[in-house]
Amino acid sequence: MDDALTEPEIVALTADHMQAAAGIRRVALWQRLPWLPDVHTPEEEQYWRMHLLPTCSILGAAMGNRLVGVIAYGDNWIEQLYVLPGFQGMGIGSSLLGCAKEEMNEIRLWTFKRNAGARSFYERHGFTAERETDGADNEEREPDVLYHWRRLPERTVRLQPRDG
């Protein structure tokens, strides 16, 4: 396989992948949001390994042999969703989000208020802003937005017998 593939391969990640997953988060977040204070260290794989891995489903998007996107989700929350900047706009984030939407009927997530790209992405995928905060409760002290998505009930069509 090579990086010219149009569809990423979605794979379940293991403890061996947590350093790469943490690296994707770090690169994607800080390249797209350089104004955020850098409150995490490159060694934050411990958070992924000790907190996220036992409590979440963690999937990765691979292009060829390279991990280019990651999502951690469970219990009606998306905890992490990041795609490397050079691979954004290719449907990778949509594929990862689609996996979470297949497994959950309702999803909530936080994103920073100034992260216009993420906000637009989630809104395109049916999420609505539910609440905004001043950021006092997050590590970066950056205003954020709580988004919510709920699966619509399936419509059933009743066929009425014709009177004859």
Image: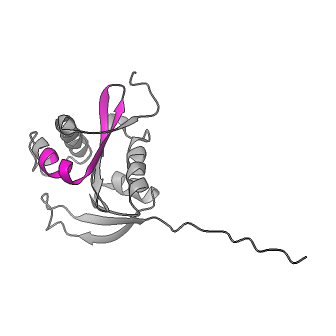
Query: Residue 38: where, in percent of width, then height?
Result: 11, 48
The residue depicted at 37 percent of the width and 53 percent of the height is 100
The vertical placement of 92 against 134, above or below, is above
The vertical placement of 29 against 154, above or below, is above
Please state the extent of the stretch shown in magenta in the rendering.
Answer: 48-70
Residue 67 covered by magenta stretch: yes
Q: Residue furthest bottom?
A: 163
Query: Residue 40: where, in percent of width, then height?
Result: 10, 47
User: Relative to 134, is 151 on the left or the right?
Assistant: right
The residue depicted at 26 percent of the width and 39 percent of the height is 13
User: Relative to 30, is 10 on the left or the right?
Assistant: right
Image quarter where the C terminus lies is bottom right
The residue depicted at 29 percent of the width and 54 percent of the height is 73
Q: Nearer the viewer, residue 112 or 109?
A: 109
Image quarter of residue 45: top left
Query: Residue 89: where, in percent of width, then height?
Result: 42, 41
The vertical placement of 36 against 7, above or below, is below
